[in-house]
Amino acid sequence: MFKGLRDRLFSVSREAKTRSIDDISEVVDESGRRLKESVLDDLLHDLELSLLEADVALPVAEELTKKVRDSLKGKRVDKDFEIEDAVRLALKAAVKEVLSEQLLSLNERIKAKPPPFVIMFVGINGGGKTTAIAKLANRMQKRGLSCVLAAGDTFRAGAIEQLTIHAEKLGCKIIKHQEGSDPAAVAFDAIEHAKARKKDVVLIDTAGRMQTNTNLMDEMKKIKRVAKPDLVVFVGDSLAGSDAVEQAKRFNDAVGIDAVILTKIDADSKGGAALSIAKTIGKPIAYISLGQEYDEFRRFDPDWMVSRIFGDPPPKVAEEV
């Protein structure tokens, strides 16, 4: 996973690695040598281009490059100094810092208010939104929380049917109306059902026509006004790269995103979407989806993501909601 990004990040330092210590450094004083500014400039220029090729948004690529520069500028070197290792360590620290700026504990959020806890999901069609909802419902039920699904994508009969199939497999209640009905009414009825039956969580699916569709955004705003969700989650396809970032920004402008779920992480060969979304909209990545099975879904953990990007052994992730 993320082999493409990892190869891009470290190919830039291979040429420098073959240079002699005199080529890459200069004598400071009797205490030793330091990395040449010209070598660092060339290295970081190539690094920034490589990040952009890996679908990292420009402002994020610039910030990561600056963090690496700050870490390496004036760095003392000796005959055993390896530029590739130095860049790797500096970049790992920078990536982890970006991914750790915003974190979310859904478990704490759910416990902090009386039930039902209402989550509204937004995102364009094809991004894996309905499957992500089912996976989260499965995760919650395994941890003792009861769920109600709301088939709020009334624009497509197929979406209602898909969520119904998931509800039947999971053994949880689904509230649905006929195709073309008011999605806000579906959300309202689901919440009322949850209140009456003392259910813990309501998960609201929504339509996902093109993110530039004004009517869609107006529809999202209405659902939010009616449902008053405790959390609005954007579900984005990591394979969409910079498009996923733009989609997240549009939904955030329209309804306000509280958290992100990234799907198709297992197929993403570049890895830029996770870094870009986390930084660009300033919202936490709550979960990542790795496949089609219900259990292929996990809490986002910066250490886990960094280990995947850099090919390190994955750390253990806490198993809360």
Image: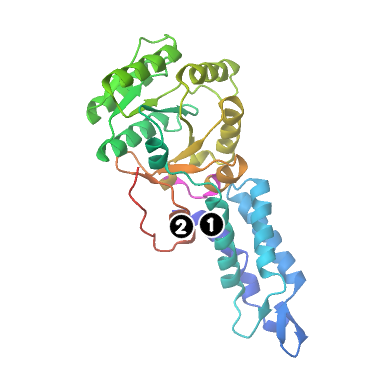
**Picture disc at residue 303:** 2
Counting residues from the N terminus, which is met first, the one under dot 1 or under dot 2? 1
Say which quadrant the C terminus sits in: top left
Residue at numbered disc 1 = 96
In the image, residue 270 lies in the stretch drawn in magenta: yes
Real-space CA distance between mark 1 and mark 2, rounded to the nearest whole angstrom: 7 Å
Q: Quadrant of residue 47?
A: bottom right
Q: Residues within 10 Å of mark 1 (few under 14, many from 20)?
A: some
Q: Position of residue 294 (x, y in %)?
A: 30, 38
Q: Position of residue 200 (x, y in %)?
A: 32, 29
Q: Are marks 1 and 2 in contact (CB under 8 Å)?
A: yes
Residue type marked 1: Lys
Near-viewer residue (317 or 25): 317
Q: Is residue 178 above or below residue 282?
A: above
Horizontal arrangement in the rendering, residue 162 relative to residue 36 (left or right): left
Q: Residue at x 27, y 35 (%)?
A: 141
Near-viewer residue (149 or 68): 149
Horizontal arrangement in the rendering, residue 215 relative to residue 75 (left or right): left
Q: Residue at x 57, y 64 (%)?
A: 10
Q: Is residue 185 above or below residue 194?
A: above
Q: Quadrant of residue 74?
A: bottom right
Q: Is residue 118 above or below residue 317?
A: above
Give the structural element (helix, strand or loop) at label 2.
helix
Q: Is residue 85 above or below residue 52?
A: below
Give the structural element (helix, strand or loop) at label 1.
helix
Residue type marked 2: Asp
Segment tinted magenta in the rendering: 267-273
